[in-house]
């Protein structure tokens, strides 16, 4: 079971790889769209990469609720 | 006791291939700047979300039949056969708005295909691949020697220009191929399928009967009839297209016994440049394989997109006759069809 820090750093690596955002900018209170410039389609790529990395299912209906990095970290921790 | 007489089996060519390809692009160009008259967006937003800079929209004279005849006549001429040798005309479309009769019969007649069987199929953006699979079977079982497959759309007729998520996406046009006998295999197994559990992910907003007979139920009492349009759930489509369709494309390669590095072209349905880019990544397509990017100037033309892109790649020299191409169509249904083909 991953810790919160491990999920955050894993997610930061994914966001860096997909959207080219420096990993250190990926913080819990950052909004994917407003702060990190991850648009709706890149968000799908982030979600699929996170599913593989953390062994979790993130349904399409849930993706719209993941507004901040913290939302995604919490969802992954609660469902993995 | 009487013996049951045996039926003489129908036999056709050992193999089939695409013999010619042709396209028709409407005259009127709609640049992003024109789309911005209808929706609150920006050229940059449209380009980064879709890769589209302009699309073609058909005028009143550029009907489904007219565009189809133009495209198919080019394909027939390139294939070197006479129209009367054609034994089947298959038209894939979702935007021929007069349901009966099928538009294929008029097209067959105008092409000079005599009394060839002619019919329409509805398989959205996979329509070309569905038609190709049928044509391949018809040629190899002997029910036809040559078959014309046409993908044609006037999606501008089904575009809600006030919907900022789709108003910039769709285009019009026609693409056609002739499928005929071959001494070597020219069409690999078509890997095709459907997923009705996702029928609502891309669909017409409302049925015609609902729109016209019960407009109040859809649009509120006293509201005007609202013309149906196409709508889609972008994220769900993107996920399915990129990740599930990459698997289908790989299955088509495997079924054909071809590896990605042997391809001369990758011609996916031109749905969205972002889908194309992500699909290349997921498929791990080797660098240097030419990829169709016709969407930039054509928009998403559904069933027409693969043959239109194929024609462009051959004309520009990006791909050569005789090269192997991986094609994959995917769209409303959801439906998909992928195959490795030899380019005409």
Image (cartoon, coloured by chain):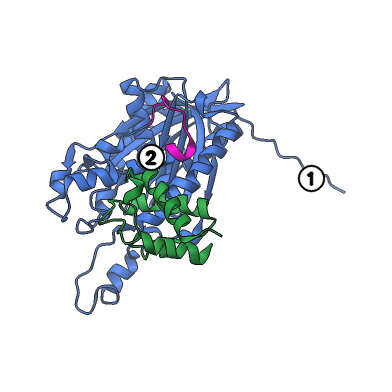
Q: Is residue B254 above or below residue A6?
A: above
Question: Which quadrant holds residue B281?
Answer: top left
Q: Name the tint of chain B in the rendering.
A: blue
Q: Is residue B156 left or right of residue A14?
A: left
Real-space Cα separation, disc 1 to disc 2, in angstroms: 55 Å
Q: Position of residue B300 (x, y in %)?
A: 31, 44
Q: Secondary structure at mark 1?
A: loop
Disc 1: CA contacts within 10 A as few (<14), some (14-19) or many (>=20)? few
Disc 2: CA contacts within 10 A as few (<14), some (14-19) or many (>=20)? many
What secondary structure predominates along the stretch shown in magenta?
loop
Q: Which mark is residue B232?
A: none
Task: Report if residue A33 lies within the magenta region.
Answer: no
User: Magenta segment range?
Assistant: B280-291
Residue for point 23% across, 41% down: B55
Q: Which residue is mark 1?
A: B4
Residue for point 27% across, 43% down: B172
């Amino acid at each position: 079971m991953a810790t919160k820090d491990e999920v955050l750093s894993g997610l930061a690596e994914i966001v860096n790889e997909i959207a080219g955002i420096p990993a250190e900018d990926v913080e819990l209170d950052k909004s994917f769209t407003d702060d990190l410039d991850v648009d709706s389609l890149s968000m799908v790529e982030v979600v699929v990469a996170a599913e593989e990395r953390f062994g979790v299912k993130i349904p399409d209906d849930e993706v719209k609720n993941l507004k901040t990095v913290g939302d995604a970290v919490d969802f992954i921790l609660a469902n993995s | 006791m009487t013996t049951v007489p045996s039926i003489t089996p129908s036999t056709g060519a050992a193999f089939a291939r695409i013999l010619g390809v042709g396209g028709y692009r409407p005259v009127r160009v709609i640049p992003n700047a024109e789309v911005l008259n209808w929706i609150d967006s920006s050229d940059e937003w449209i380009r980064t979300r879709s890769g589209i800079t302009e699309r073609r929209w058909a005028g009143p004279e550029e009907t489904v039949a007219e565009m189809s005849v133009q495209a198919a006549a080019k394909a027939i001429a390139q294939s070197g056969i006479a129209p009367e040798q054609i034994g089947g005309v298959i038209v894939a479309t979702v935007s021929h708005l007069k349901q009966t009769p099928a538009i294929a019969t008029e097209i067959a007649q105008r092409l000079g295909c005599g009394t060839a069987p002619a019919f329409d199929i509805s398989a959205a953006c996979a329509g070309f691949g569905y038609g190709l699979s049928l044509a391949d079977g018809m040629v190899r079982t002997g029910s036809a020697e040559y078959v014309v497959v046409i993908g044609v759309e006037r999606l501008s007729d089904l575009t809600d220009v006030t919907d900022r998520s789709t108003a910039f996406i769709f285009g019009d046009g026609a693409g056609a191929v002739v499928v005929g006998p071959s001494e070597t295999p020219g069409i690999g197994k078509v890997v095709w399928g459907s997923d009705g559990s996702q029928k609502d992910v891309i669909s017409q907003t409302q049925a015609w009967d609902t729109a016209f007979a019960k407009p109040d139920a859809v649009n509120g009492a006293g509201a005007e009839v609202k013309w149906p349009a196409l709508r889609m759930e972008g994220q769900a489509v993107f996920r399915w297209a990129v990740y599930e369709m990459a698997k289908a494309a790989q299955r088509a390669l495997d079924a054909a016994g071809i590896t990605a590095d042997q391809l001369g072209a990758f011609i996916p349905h031109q749905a969205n440049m972002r889908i194309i880019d992500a699909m290349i990544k997921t498929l791990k397509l080797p660098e240097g394989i030419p990829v169709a990017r016709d969407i930039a100037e054509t928009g998403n033309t559904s069933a027409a997109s693969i043959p239109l892109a194929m024609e462009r790649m051959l004309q520009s020299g990006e791909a050569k006759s005789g090269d192997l191409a991986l094609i994959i169509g995917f769209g409303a249904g959801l439906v998909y069809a992928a195959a490795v083909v030899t380019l005409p």
